[in-house]
Image (cartoon, rainbow, N blue to C red):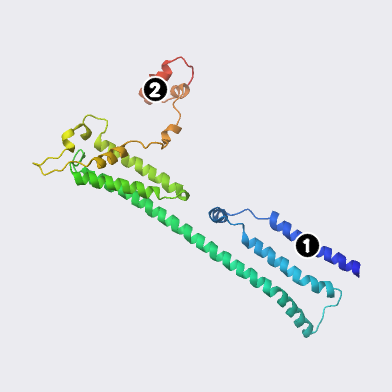
């Protein structure tokens, strides 16, 4: 009998070890939702740990009873079954109640983290919309409705436009790294409005307002104040490509000689223009 009981205990230990190994090695591939949740909240799948713990606790609770009475026949007496239920409930109830408490705490924590993540997403969308709207309003504040459009010679127009540009930049910086897609979208919108400001001000052309001193000076006879210096700086700095920001066009390679030779005949002018560049005039072979 002692040998049989020893074998039984060894079988119980082997079963516990097998459950532990399976919980560690046989995990289904995570779904997209699970990957996002794990990446966002850095969890270690506590639900599996609790399930395995409950299974182990159940086995441990039944092991002493089986160890003592496993050779006895199955009873038909209600009182003995009631005693068995009282034993199992008395052993398992505290452990399962404690695990339920842990599960509740984990659930509350996860729900709080999900709510914080959702709030972050909502805030990022609000920052993005405000930033894009501010860029558009900044252009409208400075642009005089004319054909062709020209910048308003008005101090308040320049100040309003500069403030809106600063507001757009500040809102864009609030977009967190988790919303990299919104950051790229804003960069596209910013590039669009930078081009519109560039066309309006013509900063590199002698026809632009920047070449005229009188444009920015006060005119008492017309009741016009001078254009504020810092607003000038903000707006003209916006027209320039930001320092340190990578230009996506730099990722595109130039034409090779083989690609030029394969060009459609309708692109003859483009082919001749590229072949006239310095890199094709020098004897370097195929570029």
Crowding at label 1, few (<14), some or many (≥20) Cα neighbours within 10 Å? some
Q: Nearer the viewer, residue 69 or 258?
A: 69
- Residue 77 lies in quadrant: bottom right
- x 89%, y 67%: residue: 4
- Residue 272 lies in quadrant: top left
Q: Which structural element holds mark 1?
A: helix
Does residue 104 appear left or right of residue 77 in this picture? left
Q: Which residue is mark 1?
A: 15
Total residue callouts: 2
- Residue 6 lies in quadrant: bottom right
The residue lying furthest to the left in this view is: 221
Residue 175 point in image, percent of width and height:
41, 50
Q: Which residue is mark 2?
A: 274
Mark carried by residue 141:
none
Q: Nearer the viewer, mark 1 or mark 2?
A: 1
Q: Is residue 281 above or below residue 105?
A: above
- x 33%, y 36%: residue: 240
């Amino acid at each position: 009998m002692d040998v049989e009981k020893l074998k039984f205990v060894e079988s119980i230990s082997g079963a516990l070890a097998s459950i532990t190994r399976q919980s560690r090695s046989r995990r289904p591939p995570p779904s997209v939702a699970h990957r996002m949740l794990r990446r966002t909240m850095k969890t270690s799948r506590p639900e599996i740990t609790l399930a395995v713990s409950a299974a182990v606790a159940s086995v441990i609770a039944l092991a002493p009873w089986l160890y003592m009475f496993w050779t006895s026949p199955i009873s038909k007496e209600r009182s003995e079954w009631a005693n068995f239920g009282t034993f199992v409930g008395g052993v398992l109830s505290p452990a399962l109640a404690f695990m339920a408490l842990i599960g509740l705490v984990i659930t509350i924590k996860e729900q709080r983290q999900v709510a914080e993540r959702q709030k972050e997403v909502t805030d990022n969308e609000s920052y993005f919309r405000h930033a894009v709207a501010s860029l558009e309003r900044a252009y409208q504040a400075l642009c005089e409705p004319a054909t062709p459009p020209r910048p308003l010679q008005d101090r308040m127009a320049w100040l309003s436009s500069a403030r809106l540009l600063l507001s757009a930049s500040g809102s864009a910086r609030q977009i967190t790294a988790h919303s990299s897609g919104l950051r790229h979208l804003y960069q596209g919108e910013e590039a669009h409005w930078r081009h519109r400001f560039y066309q309006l001000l013509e900063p590199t052309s002698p026809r632009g307002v920047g070449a005229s001193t009188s444009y920015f000076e006060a005119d008492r006879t017309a009741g016009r104040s001078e254009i504020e210096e810092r607003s000038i700086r903000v707006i003209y700095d916006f027209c320039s490509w930001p320092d340190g920001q990578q230009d996506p066009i730099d990722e595109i390679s130039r034409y090779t000689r083989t690609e030029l030779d394969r060009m459609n005949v309708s692109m003859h002018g483009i082919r001749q223009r590229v072949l006239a560049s310095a890199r094709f005039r020098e004897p370097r072979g195929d570029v």
